[in-house]
Amino acid sequence: MFRPLRPLQMATDIALAAGFFLVTVVFELNAGVGMMGPPTQVGAMLGVTGYVLLFSVALGFRRFSPGVALALAWAGALAQMSLLRGPSLVDFAIFGVLYAAAAYGSVRVFWAGLASAVTGAVVITLYLYLGPLYSGALDLSVLPIAVIVLGGATFALMLAWTCGALVRTARRARENRLAQEWAEEEARSEFERARIARDMHDVVAHSLAVVVAQADGARYAAAADPQAATAALQTISSTARAALADVRLLLTQLRHSQGDGPQPSLADLEELWAQVRAAGVDLRVDIDPAPPGELPASVQIAIYRILQEALTNALRHGRGDVSVRLGWHADRVELAVRNARAVDGAASADGPRGHGVIGMRERAQLVGGRLEAGEDGGDWVVSATVPIGATA
């Protein structure tokens, strides 16, 4: 497996491997550590240069391909032992390879690094005290020293591997945190898009219902009563302008998430009643008890949008009078919109499962309330209860 590296990382690893090779090859050729004598023959010099090169390439490959680096390190160690060389400066490359195997390797390379650390400690102990470099007598007196060497080698190799494992864990935790933040941001964006879509539906549907009703009235009254037609056209103009302004605000909010969309409040209910009455509907509004004080903005928006959608459905699908009942209690708001069903039996937009009813129910649920819509004695009734808390 090859990992993508940035140009700076690749250049750093190549420079480190080249510098490590130049330093250690000179040291190994002149020190003669653990050898029967200094390397005077060309073959011995080439052998020393070969395993130093393997360790250096392994060090350079440690981040680009931890698995390849681990294999090269093992090849270099075997070549070093075949030349009867003892532990030396070049073996420090093993620590870097084990660290990279744990930090950057795949799952298989990760566990292969752990196995290499344990196996390497055992191999180096056996090589030093049972191999050709050991010239003493093989008796029990060697055992304590061998155990100490085994423990020290295991600790050193496992320390390098453990440091890499900690870095791997920290990187995974950071990636998971970033993924969670991204998912939360997507959820917030999706919620905001859904809210804007509901606002767009409420604004456009209500305004177009008023415009259609006024246009039909103006068409029938144009010949008999020109003044009524003029008043209807004025209502159409004002309603369309208001809707256009709201849509522009919504589109601005789509382009700039920090922008404020149209946020209606209780003060806008009078204008809503006026628009419905201007459409030729006999609207009766009963408010009892009155609002006890300033309500939370979320509750005001929910109440307004539910009433707007319910009245829009009454304009489009109902017939006759429409009655609205509002009760502002200390801990909740109760509302009901009742209108006679149309002759064709339509109750609301797309029936009980239409987008209008679904949108109203979502509005109520977002603020912890509930909404019901259905037939009651030949009338279509939308009723909702929205909690406002004792402090409202």
Image (spheres, helix red, strand yellow):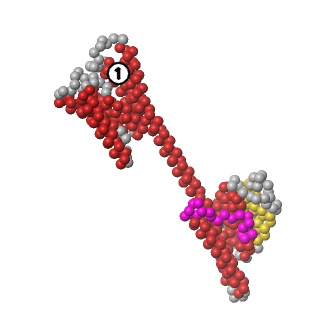
The quarter of the rendered structure image containing the C terminus is bottom right
Callout 1: 10 Å neighbours few (<14), some, many (20+)?
many
Circle 1: residue type: Thr
Q: Is residue 217 above or below residue 175?
A: below
- Left or right, 103 with respect to 387, comes to left
Q: Is residue 390 above or below residue 96?
A: below
Q: Secondary structure at mark 1?
A: helix
Q: Name which residue lies at 24% across and 33% down.
A: 49
Looking at this view, is 294 or 323 the one in front? 294
Expressed as whole percent of the image width and height from the top left, the position of residue 215 reads: 66, 79
Expressed as whole percent of the image width and height from the top left, the position of residue 35 reads: 25, 23
Q: Is residue 254 above or below residue 107?
A: below
Residue 275: quarter of image: bottom right
Q: Residue furthest bottom?
A: 223
Residue 167: quarter of image: top left
The quarter of the rendered structure image containing the N terminus is top left
- Left or right, 63 with respect to 21, comes to right
Looking at this view, is 22 or 390 the one in front? 22
Q: Name which residue lies at 60% across and 62% down.
A: 259
Q: Is residue 270 magenta?
A: yes
Residue 293: quarter of image: bottom right
Reading the image, the residue beneath label 1 is 125
